[in-house]
Image: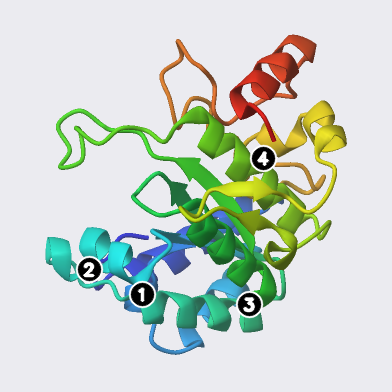
Amino acid sequence: MITHPKATEDTLYVIERLREKTDLFISVLISPTLIRTKDPLVAMKKAGADRVGIAIDAVTPQLFDQLRGAGVKGPHQWDHYWEVTRMAVSVFGRFYVGIHLIVGLGETEREMVEAIQRGQDLGTYTHLFSFFPEKGSPMEKQSSPPLGQYRRIQLARWIINESLGSASQMKFDESGRLIDFGMDVEPLIQIGEPFMTSGCPGRDGKVACNRPYGNERPSGPIRNFPFQPEAEDIEEIRKQLGAL
């Protein structure tokens, strides 16, 4: 959905047409700014949507307002996005809602992990992105987050979303850098799955929205693996993580 008065009506039309033609999972990336009650969400579910996604992106009120709200003369509001997230969970059910979060917008690792945990507590999975400076955009001169930072957040997201642990057991240094996951993460590094794209699943329960090269150039290094990392990829990931 785009933020346009006709977007809700058009979205319902598209959902209905898709449902007539396919039995695939239908996921709708909604525009919370257009949604003031549960009614549009109920209508989407009735039309055939299986789940919804919400692009919160920035993980603090200040960054959200700076990048999506008043700072860019935008209509979006931090509190309202989270309120619509709560409404969406009440309509579609726990973990049939996903939130998009972008690492590298100026937040600390602690702030990112706390946002992931907030979503988990509400009943949403996090679909994680790494900021990429698009040429010609207002943020073209901002750098992507260091690979080590992104890998740590990927691991933290996996631990939280898989209910293996929580933000409360993790430790951070004075700058907010994640320094202890509160568990042995070597087995998680070895399986490689924490570093794959996180997104909406298909009917087999595996990620169907894998967005190849959505966070980096094809020349690499790969940040979200759209395939199962192989042994050599795991070794590279381990180096990128550095000392834990």
Q: Which mark is residue 78?
A: 1
Number of other residues with Cα within 10 Å of mark 3, as a class: few under 14, some 14 to 19, many 20 or more: many
Residue type at mark 3 is Val
In this orientation, which residue lies closer to the viewer: 104 or 242? 242
Which badge, 4 or 3, comes first in the chain's sequence? 3
Q: Which residue appears at 74% of the width and 19% of the height?
A: 234
Mark closer to the chain start, 3 or 2:
2
* Residue picked out by circle 2: 69
User: Which disc number belongs to residue 89?
Assistant: 3
Q: Amino acid at mark 2?
A: Gly
Residue 175 spot, x, y in % from top left: 46, 53
Count residues near mark 2 (Cα–Cα under 10 Å), then give few for <14, some for 14-19, many for 20+: some
Is there any visible trace of residue 121 in the rendered image? yes
In the image, taking residue 167 as reference, residue 15 lies left or right, namely left
Q: Earlier in the sequence, mark 1 or mark 3?
A: 1
Could you tell me if residue 22 is visible in this image?
Answer: no
Question: Which element type, helix, strand or loop, lies under badge 4?
Answer: loop
Q: Which residue is mark 4?
A: 208
